[in-house]
């Protein structure tokens, strides 16, 4: 079994990215979207993130896009500009093969190299224990649970908040 290869997203990846995300929207609680966005919408979202200096990555395994991840703004106000929120999605058939870990490890390094200081994981739903474990394995700490904040699948869904310091988070930012 080979290891996932993580690389920056390319235009040819968006069909696979949209399919992975659509499955997560329709069958999972990681995303609180109710309708899957189109390929063009996914492409536009990535372009807006990249324009603002955020990384967007894919993992390939067995010559296929097996997952994707990105970082984006945690909140819109300027004081949060060095804190990012991460998103990681792995195709169902590639889960438990190291794809999520490879993506998250690389995303953390990319964010550190760009001067970000904190990474927040906002993990939707009570059925996402695997995502919580993944984040714990790379050094995230649980910092809270927001109870019953999303309505999906005819039930209230919780959100688990996790946080990781990036790089030399204690040093002051000069920028």
Image (cartoon, rainbow, N blue to C red):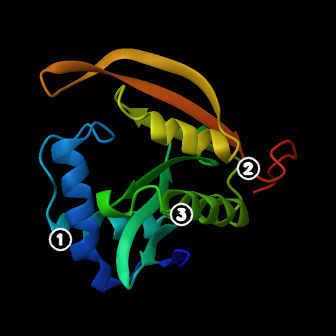
Residue plotted at (43% across, 77% down): 61
Quarter of the figure with residue 40? bottom left
Residue plotted at (30% across, 57% down): 92
Q: On screen, 175 above or below 139? A: below
**Count of numbered marks:** 3
Q: Quadrant of the C terminus?
A: bottom right
Q: CA distance from mark 1 to mark 3?
A: 23 Å
Of all residues, the one furthest to the top in this rendering is: 147
First-in-chain label (1 vs 3): 1
How crowded pointer 2 is (Cα within 10 Å; few <14, some 14-19, many 20+) is rated as many
Quarter of the figure with residue 165? top right
Q: Which residue is mark 1?
A: 40
Q: Which mark is residue 166?
A: 2
* Residue 75 visible, this orientation: no
Judge from the rendering whether residue 104 lies leftward or rightward of residue 91; answer left or right.
Answer: right
First-in-chain label (2 vs 1): 1
Q: Which residue is mark 3?
A: 103
Q: Nearer the viewer, residue 71 or 4?
A: 4
Judge from the rendering whether residue 99 lies leftward or rightward of residue 29; answer left or right.
Answer: right
Give the x, y percent position of residue 143.
61, 23
Quarter of the figure with residue 113? bottom right
Which element type, helix, strand or loop, lies under badge 3?
helix
Give the x, y percent position of residue 153.
14, 28
Label 3 or label 2, whichever lies nearer to me, is 3
Which element type, helix, strand or loop, lies under badge 1?
helix
Q: Which mark is residue 124?
A: none
């Amino acid at each position: 079994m080979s290891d996932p290869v993580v690389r920056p997203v390319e235009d040819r990846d968006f069909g696979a990215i949209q399919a992975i995300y659509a499955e997560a929207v329709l069958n999972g609680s990681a995303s609180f979207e109710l309708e899957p966005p189109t390929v063009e919408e996914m492409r536009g979202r990535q372009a807006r993130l990249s324009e603002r200096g955020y990384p967007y990555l894919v993992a390939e395994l067995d010559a296929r896009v097996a997952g994707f991840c990105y970082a984006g703004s945690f909140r819109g106000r300027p004081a949060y500009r060095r804190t990012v929120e991460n998103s990681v999605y792995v195709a169902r058939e590639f889960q438990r093969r190291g794809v999520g870990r490879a993506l998250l490890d690389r995303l953390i390094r990319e964010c550190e190299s760009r001067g970000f200081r904190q990474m927040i994981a906002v993990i939707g739903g009570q059925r996402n224990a695997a995502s919580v474990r993944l984040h714990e394995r790379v050094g995230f700490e649980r910092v809270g649970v927001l109870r019953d904040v999303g309505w999906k699948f005819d039930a209230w869904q919780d959100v688990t908040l996790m946080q990781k310091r990036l790089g030399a988070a204690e040093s002051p930012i000069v920028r």
